[in-house]
Image (cartoon, rainbow, N blue to C red):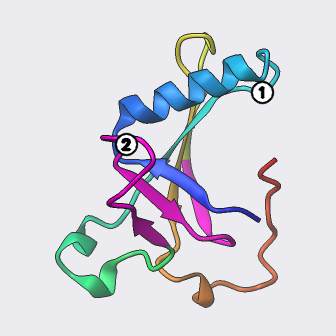
Amino acid sequence: PAFISASSDPAVAVKFAIRSFKWSKEENAPVVWIFELDPAGFKDCTKRCQQVQYLEHSSLKHEKEYVFSPYSVFFVTRTIWSNDLKTFPHVIMVKPSQNASFVSEALPTAPCY
């Protein structure tokens, strides 16, 4: 398992996905993951996802990077399949579990790589 790096800037996410697609010699379809966090968590800390941290000092300026811990739990809410992967990636929308310790350990895991 690995950390999952994300950006709150859609342009950054698309750039990384397209670049990854080119690096893989177009073998791995690019995907942009949209993490649907509870907006109430911005003001109410009891509503925040406890599996994610915001990095104030990222390796790239203006990246607006968030990092989800290994074994974070996500529920797929929607998918949008691209017809032109060279210019726009697939989109998968997920809702992170607020706290992974409340999720059954019997939940199946998906391979990331």
> Upstream in the sequence, badge 1 or badge 2?
1
The residue where tag 2 is placed is 63
User: Is residue 29 rendered magenta in the image?
Assistant: no
**Kind of residue sitting beneath label 2:** Glu
**Kind of residue sitting beneath label 1:** Asn
* Left or right of 97 on screen, residue 105: right
Kindly state the secondary structure of the residue where label 2 is placed: loop
Q: Residue at x 51, y 66 (%)?
A: 96
Q: Quadrant of residue 37?
A: bottom left
User: Is residue 64 rendered magenta in the image?
Assistant: yes
- Residue nearest the observer in this picture, 44 or 54: 54
The span shown in magenta is 52-77
Q: Tell me if mark 2 has few (under 14), some (14-19) or many (20+) residues whose alpha carbon lies within 10 angstroms of its own.
A: some
Q: With respect to residue 76, does 62 lie above or below?
A: above
Q: CA distance from mark 1 to mark 2?
A: 23 Å
- Residue nearest the observer in this picture, 41 or 6: 6
Q: With respect to residue 25, does 107 lie above or below?
A: below
- Residue nearest the observer in this picture, 42 or 59: 59
* Left or right of 63 on screen, residue 80: right
Give the number of the disc on residue 1. none
Kindly state the secondary structure of the residue where label 1 is placed: loop
Q: Residue at x 32, y 80 (%)?
A: 47
Q: Quadrant of residue 29?
A: top right
The residue where tag 1 is placed is 28
**Percent x, y of residue 51:** 51, 75
Q: Residue at x 27, y 84 (%)?
A: 45
